[in-house]
């Protein structure tokens, strides 16, 4: 049975710090995301290579699926039975892949497909550019970011097994999703916006930082599509070493015969495993 590998990403819609107060209060990231998808944007990134969002469908109140792909001219080799010769024909090619989403969270599960792009990061960049080319985003000068959600498990295991945590550094961007933690990501992203910044980081140093608090902020940082690092002492008397989130996005396998509702739930469960 075939399965498709889906990578978890986070779509963020960051409002300018000096925006109109009415817009700031009433224009939500979910509204921008859903209206942007429903526009089914297209964008020619280079000659004879146009990217599109299409096949937008709702599965639940906030969850759904859409397709992203590109159209280009391709040379197709065919055999002509009438003439008995092989021929080369120019035809339209339109490879695409599916993306599951939760608009309330800004969560994306992007299907890996090498016919569309060599890696999922490339597809994520195209989603970012397409959403940046939608009406509300352009009108209100919204910055769109599509950042991968790292799998923090290896990082957390090293934190839990360390003799002491000497330093912890976490990154943040502008306004984060609704489930950002109240301890770090939410207040720091608000602070970043008020200073009209794009991103920032906080470093905390001590003899032995609290393991539970570091783990909680690390999970939230990963879930919001940001990165973190730490300086840990693996054993008593050992020299401190630096650790950080490694690799690419959190990966989820979806069986080809699985229905859309089940697939969406697995994507959401994969996210919750990172967050919680």
Image (spheres, rainbow, N blue to C red):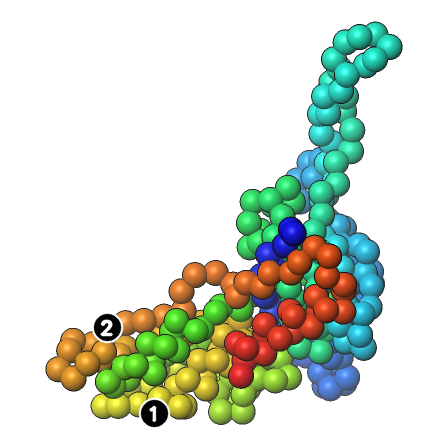
Label 2: few (<14), some (14–19) or many (≥20) C-alpha neighbours in 10 Å: few
Tell me if residue 73 comes above or below residue 222 in the rendering.
above
Q: Quadrant of residue 23?
A: bottom right
**Residue 16 coordinates in the image, percent (x, y):** 63, 75
**Residue 28 coordinates in the image, percent (x, y):** 73, 79
Tell me if residue 256 comes above or below residue 165 in the rendering.
above
Q: Quadrant of residue 253?
A: bottom right
Q: Nearer the viewer, residue 223 or 30?
A: 223
**Is 182 on the left-hand or right-hand side of 52?**
left
Residue at mark 1 to residue at mark 2: CA–CA distance: 17 Å
Which residue corresponds to mark 1? 210
Q: Given contact means CB atoms under 8 Å apart, are the residues at marks 1 and 2 in contact?
A: no
Which residue corresponds to mark 2? 241
Q: Residue furthest front?
A: 1
Residue placed at 46% from the left, 86% from the top? Answer: 216
Label 1: few (<14), some (14–19) or many (≥20) C-alpha neighbours in 10 Å: few
**Is 204 on the left-hand or right-hand side of 99?**
left
Residue placed at 64% from the left, 60% from the top? Answer: 254
**Residue 69 coordinates in the image, percent (x, y):** 71, 48
């Amino acid at each position: 049975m075939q399965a498709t590998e889906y990578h978890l990403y986070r779509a963020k819609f960051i409002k300018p710090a000096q925006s109109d107060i009415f817009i700031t209060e009433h224009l939500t990231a979910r509204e921008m995301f859903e209206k942007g998808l429903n526009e089914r944007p297209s964008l020619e990134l280079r000659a004879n290579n146009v990217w599109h969002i299409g096949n937008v469908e709702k599965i639940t109140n906030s969850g759904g699926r859409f397709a992203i792909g590109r159209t280009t001219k391709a040379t197709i080799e065919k055999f002509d039975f009438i003439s008995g010769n092989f021929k080369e024909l120019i035809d339209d090619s339109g490879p695409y892949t599916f993306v599951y989403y939760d608009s309330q969270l800004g969560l994306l599960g992007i299907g890996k497909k090498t016919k569309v792009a060599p890696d999922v990061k490339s597809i994520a960049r195209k989603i970012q550019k397409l959403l940046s080319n939608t009406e509300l985003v352009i009108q209100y000068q919204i910055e769109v970011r599509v950042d991968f959600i790292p799998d923090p498990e290896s990082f957390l295991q090293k934190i839990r097994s360390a003799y002491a945590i000497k330093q912890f550094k976490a990154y943040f961007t502008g306004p984060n999703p609704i489930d950002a933690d109240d301890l770090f990501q939410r207040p720091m992203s608000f602070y970043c916006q008020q200073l009209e910044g794009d991103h920032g980081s906080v470093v905390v140093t001590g003899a032995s930082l609290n393991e539970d608090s570091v783990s909680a902020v690390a999970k939230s940082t990963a879930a919001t599509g940001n990165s973190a690092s730490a300086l840990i002492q693996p054993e008593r008397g050992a020299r401190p070493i630096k650790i950080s989130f490694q690799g690419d996005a959190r990966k989820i396998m979806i069986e080809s015969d699985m229905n859309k509702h089940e697939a969406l739930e697995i994507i959401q469960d994969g996210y919750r495993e990172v967050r919680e």
